[in-house]
Image (spheres, rainbow, N blue to C red):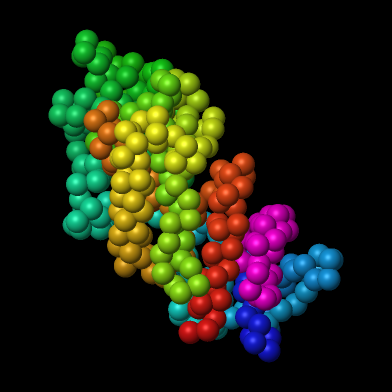
Amino acid sequence: MVGNCPVVGILVSKRNSRKRILRLYQRYNNLNIKLYAFTPADILWKEQRITGLCFKKGIWKQCSFPFPDVIYNRCFNKKLKTIHRLEKAIGSNKCFNKINFMNKWDLYNVLERTTLSSYVPDTFLYNEVNVSELLEKYKLVYIKPTYGSKGKSVYRVELTDRGDIHISLHSVAPRYICRKCEDTQGKLDELFGQKSFIIQQGIRMNQLDHQYFDIRVLLQKDILGEWKTSAITCRVAFKHFYNTSVCETVYDAAEIFPRIFLPDKVNEILRSLSVVSVKAAQEAEILMGSMGELSVDFVLDEQRKLWIIELNGKPQKIIYKDLKYYKRKIYSRPLEYAYYLSQS
């Protein structure tokens, strides 16, 4: 700590992204926090120093810094070696979002044992079940990488009324069609190779003007160290696409919900989304360790029931670029939480 001024390091994946990421947080830094951005390659372990990028007196500078008081992890990581070494140097509760590349199977097993179980679609490990049997039961399933983000390699598999099986990627239009007599499991095994996948009960999603959409709740801890809802948005997919990660438009949910629910229901559903999301975040934190932010993705089914589709430990913030009402919160709250950790 420099005087009474906490020093916060933002850990990012690539050097060429340091300036872009730091600029955003610097703009909303109202707490007299000294900020610098660095990558794992910038850590000089022997010297116990970090070569970081900072913005000082209107100039971008690369300087040698001591280890910060708090670290905000914006790297996607499954391996914890670097984080553990940093924690040894600055303290175990001073680094947040330690694990942010979430294992979907582990998370399902955590949530399924809680009061949130009714919000979670049935989920299975791909290599432990028969896809054809699940399709007979659900008619529609989604197959996802156990570790994955941005909708990559999320397949939609549907048993049609004619008995054919349609396998789609991103778009609802099938990439592959397996006739009744063909080996669907063999085709899927060929697509997935040796990678780890889960199968999720398919939810028949409510649509907005014939377009699929999901609801993303961004949760962040505040200056008191408590989970707060920072944004509730709807991501609307391109026409004929089910993958909302490649979305056409992002709306404030409060703008969209009056088109779906009766007026007296809108506030109730917004409250439910916040309460359920905070509970999901608390449960995820038991599994993942100290976190300062995550997002919870929901869909509404055709009967307007809410389902949790997945949690994200490193929520994309670019989706809020046109939603000015949210921007201050989403960039200032991680700094508030970092300040809180620096004082504890």
* Quadrant of the image occupied by residue 167: top left
Quarter of the image where the N terminus is located: bottom right
On screen, residue 274 above or below 53: above
Tell me the residue at 51%/77% (across/down).
340
Outermost bottom residue: 3
Task: Examine the rendering and report whether any part of residue 130 can be seen.
Answer: yes
Q: Is residue 30 magenta?
A: yes
Give the percent coordinates (x, y) of residue 31: 63, 73
Outermost top residue: 162
Front residue (pair 266, 181): 266
* Quadrant of the image occupied by residue 138: top left
Front residue (pair 153, 33): 33
Front residue (pair 264, 321): 264
Q: How many numbered badges does the structure rendering display?
A: 0
Tell me the residue at 62%/80% (across/down).
6
Left or right relative to 74: residue 165: left
Task: Examine the rendering and report whether any part of residue 132 can be seen.
Answer: no
Highlighted magenta segment, given as a residue range: 10-37
On screen, residue 61 above or below 295: below
Q: Is residue 2 magenta?
A: no
Give the percent coordinates (x, y) of residue 125: 25, 44
Tell me the residue at 15%/29% (across/down).
137
Front residue (pair 166, 150): 150
Give the percent coordinates (x, y) of residue 300: 31, 35
Outermost front residue: 264
On screen, residue 282 above or below 270: below
Give the percent coordinates (x, y) of residue 80: 47, 67
Tell me the residue at 40%/55% (across/down).
102
On screen, residue 15 above or below 300: below
